[in-house]
Amino acid sequence: MRGKESSGAAIAKASLGVPGLARFAPYLSRLSARSALYTDLRLLLDDRSTPLASERYRSLVLDKNCLSRGSASARRKLWKELHARYRLDAADPLFSAFWIEWLRSASEPERSLTAYILFALNDRLVADLGTDCLFPLLRRAPADLRVEEVTAFLKRAAGSRHPEVARWSRKTTTAVAQKYCASIRDFGLAKGSVRKVTVRPALYGAPVRLLVRALRMTGIPSLALVRAPIFRLLGVDNFEVVDALGELNSQGALRFRIQGDVVELDLPEAA
């Protein structure tokens, strides 16, 4: 007889919709082709008050050429990469959650960090690089962000939890590492061209709320949520999450209170 699905299995199943939180999601080499394409994302989303269906975004890129590419082939490739990175569909729960926070972002740094969180939540490799490799560099900022360190991370992953990386060519592995470092700079977490040094992010409401929304999609209990290591993407260690949420509560960015094992965490509703 099949028993009821355990809470752990239910959470694991739900997290499949958020690859960056899915424990067994594979590492993808999509960054070997292009970096995060954040500038193109911003141009596609700016000056719109509502999110669009995937086909509408596709038409803007392919038919309207809103991102100014010189050929149909280049437009098709760009759409494929943008859609893979950011989901770009009003019906998609993660993109919908992102859109709420994108509109609420009050500055360009807040918007870029919110886009970075979506980028990481949609890619387990980016999430793990952010929480394991980039996190200590953000804490020590300014610190050198080196392609060699990212490559070393990938090699370790290939020999342990992610054998799929072992099947990548050396060229692919190097390209992923290079494009990752370029992406981190584009999101404002590093600066420099040849030599990149990290910039520790300020605490903003929108990217933190997006993380909370994504964690809730997986069904994680509130007490575990406020200790989740995924907040390391923003330079916040898991034992500091409560203090960070308390600070955002004092700013009015969300409502948060914790007493013992009881957590009250309320996010503003969509406008």
Image (cartoon, rainbow, N blue to C red):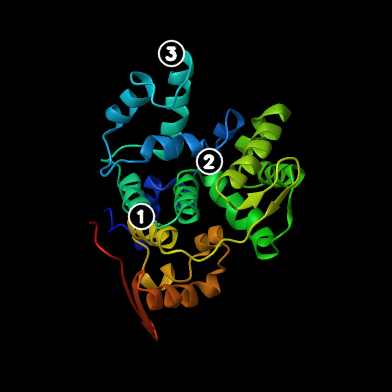
Please determine whether, in this image, residue 38 is positioned above or below residue 135. above
Name which residue lies at 32% across and 30% down.
57
What mark, if any, has residue 26 been given in the picture? 2
Q: Of the residues under marks 3 and 1, which one precedes in the sequence?
A: 3
Q: Which residue is mark 3?
A: 72
Q: Tag 1: residue type?
A: Glu
Q: Which residue matches tag 1?
A: 101
Image coords of residue 77 (percent x, y): 47, 21
* Closer-to-camera residue (148/128): 148
Residue 22 showing in the rendered view: no
Q: Is residue 174 above or below residue 24?
A: above
Question: Would residue 166 be visible to someone looking at this image?
Answer: yes
Residue 202, position as x, y percentages in the image: 54, 64
Q: Earlier in the sequence, mark 3 or mark 2?
A: 2
Q: Looking at the picture, which amino acid does disc 2 mark?
A: Pro
C-alpha distance separating marks 1 and 2: 27 Å
Q: Residue at x 75, y 40 (%)?
A: 194
At mark 3, the secondary structure is: helix
